[in-house]
Amino acid sequence: METIIMKMEIVEQVNQAYLIRIAFGKENAHILFEPAKKALCHLEETDFSAWLQRHEYQLRTMLHNKRLDTFYPGFRLTFVFWLGKDVAAYNDRSKLVVLDKRRAAWKNYVIAYSDEKIDKLFTDASLMEKTGKGGLAVIHEDRNGEYSLYQESVNGLGNNLLELMAVIKGLEILRDVEKIRIVTDSQYVRKGLTEWIVNWELNDWMTVNGEKVKNIEMWQRFNELSKGKYIEFEWVKGHSDHFENTLCDLYARAASNKEQ
């Protein structure tokens, strides 16, 4: 799937709305967006404006995710448009999201299934909120169906960060393996590592709200570990009797209860 890089700038405030310029190369278009009502109006009738209207879903997603207090004249952002993006497919949790960085810095797409023999990483994390103790677990199933386990106890970290750390630990274990499937029950991991991270990197690790991304060093570590790899992301529902996910959950819980 091809990507193109665009820039946006909030030019001025007009009552409760904001005049926003969208630029791609020498092409410019202006929209009026009212955050409180999520109302968007295209102000020109040019080919570029018409193109933006056809891809309005991605534009709206970005603007809707931006907090009201971060709209102000002078705000600038670089962002990616995914050409031909099948939004419904990306939102279909039964499908695999593929990140292929073997020949390009960022290439991803969705497939319905894959029957290829591939190394699998099953990852999960657990946080004991009362004690602040956390644990992560990684189960590696190689292409011969053999399993190996990694556990770690960690204190003072949130659940999302623990989920991300589990994936990173798995990639460290399989540093020399090119093709991997990551099986996780975390949408934070699935979306963060295939979609959000691209825009963050373009903006020097700033979010759409103009704030530094949390846990930058972890996202950057994933970037390094994923170079030259083909990675499939499979989401499974937690606590749904998925064998390996259930095991990961049990081992992560056990790690979170260990004395450190």
Image (spheres, grey):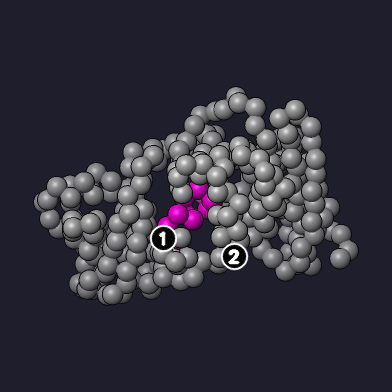
Residue nearer the viewer, 233 or 217: 217
- Residue type of the residue flagged with mark 2: Glu
Quarter of the rendering occupied by the C terminus: bottom right
| Quadrant location, the N terminus | top left
Establish if 23 lies above or below 12.
above
**In the rendering, which numbered label is found on residue 119?**
none
Q: Where is residue 171 in the image (x, y as percent from the top left)?
A: 66, 48
Sequence-wise, which precedes: disc 1 or disc 2? Answer: 1
Q: Nearer the viewer, residue 99 or 86?
A: 99
Q: In which quarter of the image is residue 67?
A: bottom left
| Majority secondary structure in the magenta region | helix
- Between residue 142 and residue 189, name the one nearer to us: 142
The amino acid sitting under disc 1 is Leu
Quarter of image, res 6: bottom left
Mark on residue 202? 1
* Alpha carbons under labels 1 and 2: distance apart: 15 Å
Q: Is mark 1 on a helix, strand or loop?
A: helix
Span highlighted in magenta in the image: 192-200
Residue 194 falls within the magenta-colored stretch: yes
| Mark number, residue 217 | 2
